[in-house]
Image (cartoon, rainbow, N blue to C red):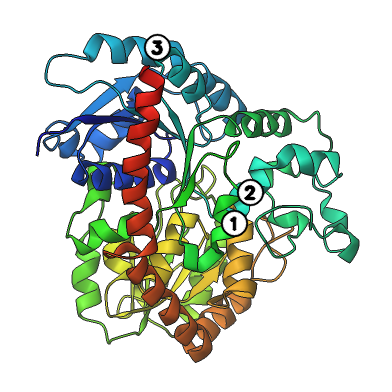
Amino acid sequence: MAKSLHAVMVPFPVQGGINPLMQLAHLLSERGFFITFVNTEWCHRRMLDAGGHALQQPAEGFRFLTIPDGLPAKHERYTDLITYLRALENLAPVLEQRLLVTLSEGIPPITCIIGESYMSCTYQLALNLRVPRVVFWTMCAALSISQFKAELLLSRGHIPVKLGEAKRAENLITCLPGNLPPLLPTDLISFYRAESASDALVKRFLYESQMQNKGDYVLVNTVEELEGREAVAALSINGCPAMAVGPLFLPNFLAHRDVVRSTSMFAEDESCLEWLDAQQPASVIYVSFGSTAVKSKQQLEEIALGLENSQRPFLWVLRKDIAQGEPGILPQGFLERIRDRGLIVRWAPQVKVLSHPSVRAFLTHSGWNSVMESFSFGIPMLGWPYFMDQFLNCRFVKDMWKIGMDFEGVDVDENKLVTREEVEKGVRRIMESEEARQRVFKLKEAAMKAVNPGGSSFLNLNKFVEEITQIAKSFAR
């Protein structure tokens, strides 16, 4: 297919930000777009080290562009987040220069810049290049609205979040658009949990909110049937279209495209799939806390003993760096005792795991990508949020959609020690809950319908292609 359109995709450079934008890139490529996918050099190196050979030999109509993020190679990007965000804000000039010098014969002129919502640099980049800026929300619509309207929440006294008063009924958040259910203060992005509005991260996220209100189109990685069309429409910028196009991974999965593997920062251990093949149907709990969460050595021991005492088969993703800089030492004799019904890997091909018939439940950090992957395969969740949007995701899974459970108290204290008894009880309950299982099957059907031809997300993505083309023409006049 001759490609006359050209989308420059700019993800937030973390695993959970790159994944959905790459999924979107493949769906747009199918619809006639040439794709320029932008990675920072630091992320690009990590992907290559993890086996991302597709980065060196991209598919036809794709190219990868790498740019420096301005930080030393050994800088702790995820722990020194404020410095990281400030560095990313200043990427527009270097990215503009790289784009201009790499445009050549055979590459269509740029149609639009599609930037993850926290990549505020894409606003200036789109202005300079005179093309539309598409704001892409990787989080659910409800959380995105709370961030989009952060200035309103600040003016109403909801930001910064006072955890000691979070459970009071008078502090429920009811001023947001989109026909949302009342939000708890603890539902807001975790970085708003600060002593004052002058906190550096609070100020940073308020600035990002201002920039998220500037653009020409909005795409949201969610499902209309899950959150409602009004919630998605509430993310519109000055009347511009806002469309739900998720779950973005699902049409690629159904088309047998292993998109994640090409951009994973972790080497996937596919041997776990053979282990799952040997387990009984719907018998395994999958345990993974995502790419950035950390746990204390004591907490890891409690998790290990809780899983052991549950007497349920489990597959546990235990990252090398999960134990707060300490070696992830497990209880003495643990591996020997669980060898017949447990498996531990450093990283797993999560979509393949969750779609496996042996998996019945998911103990998760409640990141939005994981939540969507889980309900798209009919897998109930036991939530254990860590930061960012995970607290709202976890609560909505439990209270709004009723497709999962959580641990008491972690919503107000992400460092609370969850005991082995609580882990054991939680695992048993989620594995035995027929109610959660029946409810999540209905969401699975809705997700499948949304991404298939004629479904809401499928049609919304087609509409985006038509409309962004017209918007781009108006910019070129």
* Residue 366 - label: none
- Does dot 1 land on a helix, a strand or a loop? helix
Q: Is mark 3 on a helix, strand or loop?
A: helix
Quadrant in the picture for residue 470: top left
Label 2 sits on residue: 145
Residue that carries the numbered disc 1 in the rendered image? 231
Q: What residue type is labelled 3?
A: Val
Sooner in the amino-acid sequence: mark 2 or mark 3: 3
Q: Position of residue 313 (x, y in %)?
A: 37, 80
Q: Which amino acid lies under the numbered mark 1 shown in the image of this protein? A: Ala
- Badge 3 crowding class, 10 Å Cα cut-off, few under 14, some 14 to 19, many 20 or more, is some
Please identify the quadrant where the C terminus is shown: top left
User: Counting other residues with Cα less than 10 Å from the Cα at mark 1, is it few (<14), some (14-19), or many (20 or more)?
Assistant: many
Measuring from the top left, give residue 28's x and y in whole percent: 26, 43
Q: Going by the image, does 477 lie left or right of 364?
A: left
Whether tag 1 and tag 2 are in contact, CB under 8 A, the answer is yes
Q: Are marks 2 and 3 in contact (CB under 8 Å)?
A: no
**Residue under the image location 44 percent in, 23 percent down:** 74
- Please say if 116 is above or below 399: above
Q: Say what amino acid the circle numbered 2 marks.
A: Ile
Q: Quadrant of the N terminus?
A: top left
| Rendered image: mark on residue 94 | 3
Along the line of sight, which residue is nearer the eye, 85 or 346? 85
